[in-house]
Image (cartoon, coloured by chain):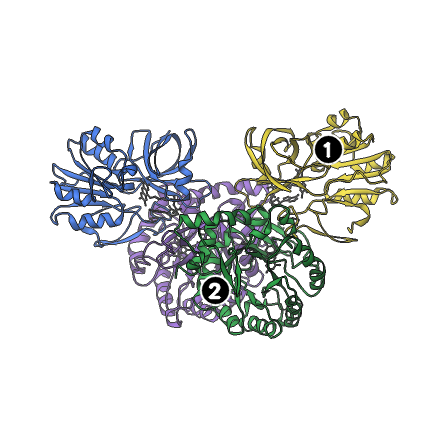
Chain colours: A yellow, B blue, C purple, D green
Amino acid sequence: MKKSDFKILSNKKIADKTYEMKLFCSGEHGISNGGQFVNIKLDGFFLRRPISVCDWTDSNITIIYKTVGAGTEKMSKMEAGQMLDILTPLGNGFNIEDENIGEKPVLIGGGAGVPPMYGLCRLLISKGVKPSVILGFNSQKDSFYIEEFKAMGADVYVTSADGSIGTEGFVTDALKTIEYTYFFACGPEAMLKAIDYTADKKTDGQLSFEERMGCGFGACMGCSCETKYGSKRICKEGPVLKRGEIIW
Amino acid sequence: MKKSDFKILSNKKIADKTYEMKLFCSGEHGISNGGQFVNIKLDGFFLRRPISVCDWTDSNITIIYKTVGAGTEKMSKMEAGQMLDILTPLGNGFNIEDENIGEKPVLIGGGAGVPPMYGLCRLLISKGVKPSVILGFNSQKDSFYIEEFKAMGADVYVTSADGSIGTEGFVTDALKTIEYTYFFACGPEAMLKAIDYTADKKTDGQLSFEERMGCGFGACMGCSCETKYGSKRICKEGPVLKRGEIIW
Amino acid sequence: MVNTKVDLCGVTLDNPVMAASGTFGYGYEFAELFDINILGSFSFKGTTLEPRFGNPTPRIAECREGLINSIGLQNPGVDKVIEEELPKLKRCLHKKVMANVGGFSVEEYTEVCQRLDSCDQVGWLEVNVSCPNVHGGGIAFGTDAKAAAQVVKAVKSRVSKPVIVKLSPNVTDITEIAAACEEAGADGISLINTMLGMRIDLKTRKPVVANKMGGFSGPAVFPVALRMVYQVYECVDIPIIGIGGIFSAEDVIEMMLAGASAVQIGAANLVNPYVCKEVVEALPQTMKKYGINDLKDIIGGAH
Amino acid sequence: MVNTKVDLCGVTLDNPVMAASGTFGYGYEFAELFDINILGSFSFKGTTLEPRFGNPTPRIAECREGLINSIGLQNPGVDKVIEEELPKLKRCLHKKVMANVGGFSVEEYTEVCQRLDSCDQVGWLEVNVSCPNVHGGGIAFGTDAKAAAQVVKAVKSRVSKPVIVKLSPNVTDITEIAAACEEAGADGISLINTMLGMRIDLKTRKPVVANKMGGFSGPAVFPVALRMVYQVYECVDIPIIGIGGIFSAEDVIEMMLAGASAVQIGAANLVNPYVCKEVVEALPQTMKKYGINDLKDIIGGAH
Ligand SMILES: Cc1cc2nc3c(=O)[nH]c(=O)nc-3n(C[C@H](O)[C@H](O)[C@H](O)COP(=O)(O)OP(=O)(O)OC[C@H]3O[C@@H](n4cnc5c(N)ncnc54)[C@H](O)[C@@H]3O)c2cc1C
Ligand SMILES: Cc1cc2nc3c(=O)[nH]c(=O)nc-3n(C[C@H](O)[C@H](O)[C@H](O)COP(=O)(O)OP(=O)(O)OC[C@H]3O[C@@H](n4cnc5c(N)ncnc54)[C@H](O)[C@@H]3O)c2cc1C
Ligand SMILES: Cc1cc2nc3c(=O)[nH]c(=O)nc-3n(C[C@H](O)[C@H](O)[C@H](O)COP(=O)(O)O)c2cc1C
Ligand SMILES: Cc1cc2nc3c(=O)[nH]c(=O)nc-3n(C[C@H](O)[C@H](O)[C@H](O)COP(=O)(O)O)c2cc1C
Ligand code: FES
Ligand code: FES
């Protein structure tokens, strides 16, 4: 992990209360797995803001965030050229070396849980695996990145709670209609729980969690979570946990 | 008093650790007397910084400040175009209507106490009074505004503690050599006391004081000072006190 | 339309926002800036029996997100307050004002309270028990449950207006003191007063304020104040005025969720003299944002 | 060349800057970032007899210039600390480390201290008496002078290493507790631990941390910590470790002027993992700026 100054390349609204920010880092950012995150310092706020990496190149990263409070509101008003003090890379990220992944894994992202699926999808495709992707939104106005996922060549299924885009319903409704060898999921905890409940008990999977963080890099024990294999820190041994270790 | 957003027009170094900042206010700033001050909010600092007004026009004010701590350091790095949240006008300022002023008052400024003498000098001259001005500095490198005072037409005497500019010595040494009907003084408390000690007991005068301030506009009683006529607030009934009321 | 009205010991406030004692003078500095009648009310500078100059200067030290003050209860004494300040205040405030009372003995508290109790303008007596008890060896009345209760009891026996006791946060167990005050007859509790704090000047290597230590307040103390309001709400039935670090309408709502029936804004007034006005004006829209129709409904809502 | 060396209970520290317990893990996360041997030392995560998962999450709430934590002493238990963590630490720290010890009974404290006392790497035992006393009705050991002294006495009778007692700031009179601990044999005093604080989420209308209240620390608490160090310096002769809100070399010097022989940096590590390194590196030039040649000379300099 290291602390670097990233330069904002662009910061644009892509859906209701949802922004995409592209950042440039002159050094190495170290992100290598989908599902890893960065921790962003904002002037006037004591704690950093953890945000998943959506996609990355050697020197750039893209993040997508929803404005839910004062910190993300402040981020949404920042402009290209401004600098951000960021800790990176953080978290384990999704493990795409798992031997059980098989030929048709499904990626399930809900709302602010969609972004990390993008980089993961790109990595899987570059490995020759063409995943299915289920994207769940509340409503059309909240939806984003659907075309981007399609452009990568994934089979994309969209659900929305109010039916204004894709199929009316939840990601689990779509999950029931498709075949898959493995699943990767990120989204609100209720969604993750529903996925675990819905998915075939024999199918393995990885789920990415959120927790209020003190440090984001393993120093404070603020984000601990009990698993079947002992306590894990969401920021360090997580945010991605394997299906089999989760205690709901 | 009111709170306004001032725009920085310029901010330049004019002597060692000494900066001159010109500010523009789209509304009325209300400054009308030399020796009044403004109270400046700086991001990242809880309390405002009180700084005397050096000179003003209808829409502009000029301040001169020394970098003595984190707040003034921060100010010195600000650039033209940036905005500052400022309370103005504050304090009584020097009273140039006093009937005892006579034809040859002397203005005595020491170090960061020089700036308020400038606006005061301009007002006196515009009233047809041509004052003497004694400016005291530690050293040549700390000196500023000597030519500006001369350009106004005042009789300027300069002293420096190390003799590197003007006469070697203190403002009181210069004071002893001239004739004056009244005095106005601003500078470190030790200097004010020395002036009071040196000046002819029958000559009246006004002295401007500094005190740590909570509010700067009379609300907190943080800056109270005992005078012969009861307690006064440096920020409201001051910063200028009459010679006769001061209890040292 | 949202409802911002709350009840404070039988007096209805248009809204729960008051200015805190010692940061709003007697109101006129602020009345020049805005109509102070938009406030719920305010608490005027702590009043003692005799005039007091207060502590030596410097009396102010800056802190991160706060300041230390060691004013030392500078005030013109209760008689001058009644004769001079209250009539002047009457011209700008048409509401009941809260009279903040300091004292160094039980007798002083009761005497000052009694005189202020007879003033029509005064709606509540706010008894600040954070002053050192000169007869009790200098320990603040507010740090000892028995001493605090004794003050409340003595004052209550001599006045007719609601008595609100203002507690010091510098204690091990705030609930014990609050409960003792309720038991002694207090009609309400204000918390918190300032925390004992200090700063040292690196250049002079001496404490910044002449009195060495002083009262620390401002946004920095908000989490401690909120916690104390929450704790006290669970152990008393009388209304609580939440004080400490309030700067925004959000802070007001958070304090009320913890258990405050009204709030006071202190240090913020010194930095932004318009803050009370801004908070009062922001309150309705902030209530809407968080789905609150009637402020009364959320008092203690986090319990 | 300026001298940054100080003495802490007979052990010389290269400089007074330590990382505070609970914010530096067992050092390795930070050893990846910089050579942690540049520190005076650090205090590792609070250790109890049995492994503890700690409190339910959320355990963290943000505050202005600080945070609230309610970790609840998560740790693998003293045996695992000795068997696994200390050997790993040995690879990155060639100095004595401070062992922070938690406990819920006098027996637990003594037992854990005794086991850690036998570890070569451990230079000092830092006994955190802010935990609730389960046998004493849940009141923290650190809020009662007798209970705190009892812990110190029991521990001292069983260990040979210096015992530093870490006090809670949530008390009416810190000097009473510090004096009782000195009297009971403590070799040093660490202050402060966190202040009891709280935040409420306006959207859910519930406390942010699952445990409702938690420990508040960060720059916001600095003036309270400094005041306590100053007060305690006047009433004890043993060294004091100043803790609370330290972020910069200036803060270190201010704490030392108040009376600290060494300092610990806590919350700042979580926000800027390089802060300890930056402070250590800034110390010499900051000393020069304020005319300090030898840091030892300024301890208590503001008295
Ligand atoms: C590993 C991880 C990855 C994340 N990735 C994304 C992402 O890609 N896009 C996105 O929109 N959001 C993401 N989040 C959530 C994001 O961190 C919060 O929405 C953000 O911190 C809110 O800050 P705020 O100041 O706007 O909100 P406030 O509620 O004002 O924040 C107050 C405090 O609570 C914390 N907080 C609030 N909500 C959350 C939350 N859901 N999780 C953790 N801490 C929280 C803040 O960090 C801050 O410390 C992620 C969270 C985690 C833990
Ligand atoms: C009425 C008045 C007029 C002033 N006019 C000028 C001027 O024209 N030019 C100029 O250079 N300086 C002037 N000063 C002094 C100026 O206010 C301080 O130098 C400045 O506040 C220092 O801020 P800092 O953050 O750099 O220092 P720090 O020492 O870091 O400030 C810490 C705190 O102490 C206060 N403080 C520090 N020094 C003083 C001081 N001397 N007087 C009052 N408060 C202080 C600061 O405002 C702040 O709250 C004036 C002060 C007063 C009271
Ligand atoms: C400058 C100043 C003067 C104060 N004077 C008094 C006072 O006379 N009586 C009193 O009860 N409290 C007094 N207080 C305490 C405030 O009323 C309030 O309880 C405290 O500052 C916490 O609120 P805050 O964080 O909003 O400032 C004073 C506070 C300040 C900052
Ligand atoms: C996340 C966190 C965990 C902590 N855990 C411990 C602990 O286990 N033992 C202890 O004595 N203090 C613990 N503390 C208190 C710190 O060591 C320190 O005393 C306090 O935070 C004040 O310092 P600061 O303001 O620099 O954070 C913890 C503090 C934080 C923020
Ligand atoms: S947030 Fe600090 S350990 Fe995970
Ligand atoms: S600084 Fe507040 S009254 Fe003068």
Nearer to the camera, C18 or B236: B236
Q: Position of residue A125 (x, y in %)?
A: 79, 30
Nearer to the camera, C189 or B94: B94
What residue is shown with label 2? C186
Q: Position of residue B198 (x, y in %)?
A: 16, 49
Amino acid type, residue under disc 1 in the picture = Gly
Nearer to the camera, C158 or B89: B89
- Identify which residue is drawn at 73% across, 33% down: A119
What residue is shown with label 1? A119
Q: Is residue C17 visible?
A: no
Amino acid type, residue under disc 2 in the picture = Ala
D44, above or below B16, in the image: below
> Does residue A219 appear left or right of residue B39 in this picture?
right
Q: Position of residue D73 (x, y in %)?
A: 65, 59
B129, above or below C55, in the image: above
Q: Nearer the viewer, mark 2 or mark 1?
A: 1
